[in-house]
Image: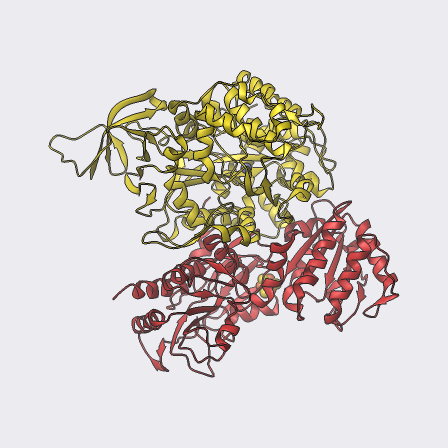
Amino acid sequence: MQSSGKSQTDSNSTIHEHVACPACGLLCDDLTVSRNASGILEVSPNTCARSVQFFQRPLVDTSPRIADKSSTLQEAIAKAAEILKKANQPLIAGLGTEVQGMRAVMQLADRTGATLDHMNSYSTLRNTLVVQNSGWMVTTLTEVRNRVDLLLIIGTDIVSYNPRFFERTIWNSETMFDQDTSKREVVYLGGRGLDTSQGISPAGVKPTVLECDIEQLPDVTAALRALIAGKQLQADSVADIPVAELAKLAERLQAAKYSVVTWISSAFDFPYAELTVQNITETVIKLNEKTRASGLPLGGSEGDYSVNQTSTWISGYPVRNSLQRGFPEYDPWQFDAERMLDNGETDALLWISCFQPEKTPPASAAPTIVIGHAAMQFEHEPDVFIPVGTPGLDHAGTMFRIDSSVTLPLAGLRKSALPSLAAVIDAIEAATQLD
Amino acid sequence: MLIKLTGGKVYDPAHQVDGKVTDIYIRDGRIVEGQHDGEKIDEEYDLRGKIVMAGAIDMHTHIGGGKVNIARMMLPEDHRGDLVAHTEHCRAGCGHAAPSTLTTGYRYAEMGYTAGFEPAMMPVNARQTHLEMGDTPIIDKGGYAMLGSDDFFLRMLTAKQDQNAINDYVAWTLHASQAIGIKVVNPGGINAFKFNQRALDLDELNTHYQVSPRDVLKALSRAVHELGVPHPLHVHGNNLGVPGNMETTLKTMGASEGFPMHLTHIQFHSYGTEGDRKFSSGAAAIAEALNKHKNISADVGQILFGQTVTASGDNMRQFANAGHGSPKKSVIMDIECDAGCGVVPFKYKDQNFVNALQWAIGLEIFLLMEDPWRIFLTTDHPNGAPFTSYPHLIRLLMDKSFRNDTFAKLNLDAQAMSTLSSIDREYSLYEIAIMTRAGAAKLVGLHDRGHLGVGAGADITVYTDQPDREAMFAKPDYVFKDGELVVRNGQVVKVTWGSTHTVRPEFDRGIEKDLKKYFDRYHTINMENFKVRDDEIAEGGRGKVIIQACEGRREKSE
Ligand code: SF4
Ligand SMILES: [Zn+2]
């Protein structure tokens, strides 16, 4: 009863069911993963290109390195501890990890007075700042799957970030309230040349597509917000979109019973994007005066949401934050890892990336420790490299889904000699306490 | 290892001990009879003149889970006023309205509390709640699983499934979410809000399911009782904060048809509509009804003045209240066909008529309620005030002149509407010990906590008797957790990890067939992943899972 089945935790078995996939923020947990004779993991039947790539990456056997020379794990840990101990302003960045990894990192940061930044902060902060400034009304994936009647997608195709979104939550065959999902309406607002094919309903109904350059979203979302608030617009068009079209969209939103307005913050690649997120969320709040509507931030990768949540309950703050002065401080500008590295404000960089070998640290003059995916390759060899396992492949873990209300266990699916990030961080922390 | 606590004045209401000087012996984390022959005492504490009680238990405090973390994330400006640097024993964090988990554990312990229960754990969010409680050191914890607005349950009610099936589902939920009780929030109302209903009275129907809050309360209170779960159904009623809601509350007391029920933060549900401003105290009527209904207990949810944040599963009411927020921001969520949440920062002001009267209403209820075993000391942390204000609240209850002096400084119109200054009662130490220890343990179903009898877990708090009760309760001399000294002079001297208390009533696992079908058809997560495993709670040496007994399980109903 209390165990979620042997297959979840036993890395000897060759077939694992209801496996959660950490490759994007949807965290689909309907995957079956089997290990073939050569040890490669195969995913079926519910796959997407992104999950296939994630699970099928072969296990690489790399040993730790100090200054590009192979070392034992103990030596590498000792060297990493030495670098951190010497540093006055250590920076722990990248942070591609999940809950247990971040828990360990928080403790090390407390001990060493480190600053913390996630590689996706530039994007997640666009949402966080809105929560801190005005709040929002949002919903979660199971609600969407059962209730949405009008989906408004702002500035993205969704599928390049969350490949199975439509399959799992829009065109699902059944809903709890006997809705005919093929009648669900989909509107894309903003962006150009997006792949809107997945927005076509099973009955062949095409989505409404209102295109504009992504940089024009601030104007377009402000116009929609004004229309929903009952204001008259003087212009005939906003960013090439006829106001009449926006007015029609506003009417559809007002007529819908449970509309969902979604966006992906990393797609909002323009300055002050948080103000556009706020236009969206305030539009949703306004709609709720009469009917029901909800926001749904999507995207998510590299454990960004898990790291933010864990950091928030342990210190009070999401990233970017710092324990340099002995107590937590939060400052999205000051504790920007790239800015600190560019300005020489840090004297040791610990870079973490457990999910993707491609996520290597930015070039820096500071002594650099990398703890990450065993297949990582570097243009500039770090002072210390410690390969670790990937949660959800090599060892168990816990991950937050993009809608932040659901956390799921990640399974260890194969035998791996690679240590977990938490184990390595704990050992480094212990070593920093030795004289 | 044998510890002797010598000569303290002991208040142990579970054994009717009212200030008797008694020695207490602790061996291996438990209270024992005394020395074996020839056994030597390893440590002795001279407690002559000191007050000794069991560790205090907060039976309703929002310390973990989604909405609490949203509150933390929303309030960097509040954290800035109370940043906590690391010390030799403790790690850094933040305090005040939405404290970080570590700081929460330290501060509870430093106030002599050794357990706290998260009252609004959404089953789908249970894993996160346990993760956060797992990072809350020293104190024991547990959660009440929220049911009543979840679509699976409402479908059962609509389909008129029999009580036995409902009992099985309730039991399954307790197991899956690792909970110790069942909570219902705005019964059926969180769900109704998803269908765009904006209010739901006790006998009003959910437009989709055609069931009323009364139906929900009846089915759930009976299920909890028949499963033998010690903690009665924990009820956050309909119409929270609405003037005139005392009528709903009075009717709600009868809705369980005699089954035990706990009405939480009852202060927020005790409002009348008298006076020029159509807002008045319903405390007298509510207390009278509580005195009469022996199957009903309540905690107060006292408000105290200052900045805080309200965090609730009741998104219907929180949406309605969002405009009153200060600073003005709010997070409102629908969640996973399971429930919802609403977080609204709030500032209670002593010169505001409504807030001042709310303050008085809470105290009136405390003072008019005759049976201290059925009323509990809470601020509904952080909704009425942060838990760190408990010592102040205790002083208000124990010290009439202090209470009246405070009252005299409030909004004058509110003073005119309250009978508070005419109430002479002062709580005794014995009564405080009932409310915060013996009664709380009994209510939650912690069979070996909240008392100082032989066999109890050695969670013990020692105070210096001071006339200023606020100072006294703010800074205990010693706090022992499972027999280890964790606090000395109000400061943490050792960090341990408390346990997580659960119940696991027996049930017919056949219910999983229906549940699996439901998950597979409608949900976005797999049923197996919904369940929180023991090792997820007890990982990395962070304490253990304790299963409290469900005594008195009733035969299945026909
Ligand atoms: S959609 Fe995302 S979570 Fe789901 S299988 Fe694909 S990559 Fe994994
Ligand atoms: Zn509460």
Q: Which chain is red?
A: A
Q: Quadrant of residue A387?
A: bottom left
- Location of the N terminus of chain B (image quadrant): top left
Describe residue B55's horizontal placement relative to residue B160 as left or right: left
Q: Residue placed at 28% from the left, 41% from the top?
A: B484
Residue B214: x and y, percent?
Answer: 65, 27
Nearer to us in this view, A379 or B288? B288
Describe residue B420's horizontal placement relative to residue A271 as left or right: left
- Figure check: A77 above or below B355: below
- Location of the C terminus of chain B (image quadrant): top right
**Which color is chain B depicted in?**
yellow
Residue A88: x and y, percent?
Answer: 38, 70
Residue B436: x and y, percent?
Answer: 42, 30
Nearer to us in this view, B137 or A4? B137
Q: Quadrant of residue A23?
A: bottom right
Nearer to us in this view, A142 or A279? A279
Quadrant containing ligand 2 reads top right
Describe residue B38's horizontal placement relative to residue B327 as left or right: left
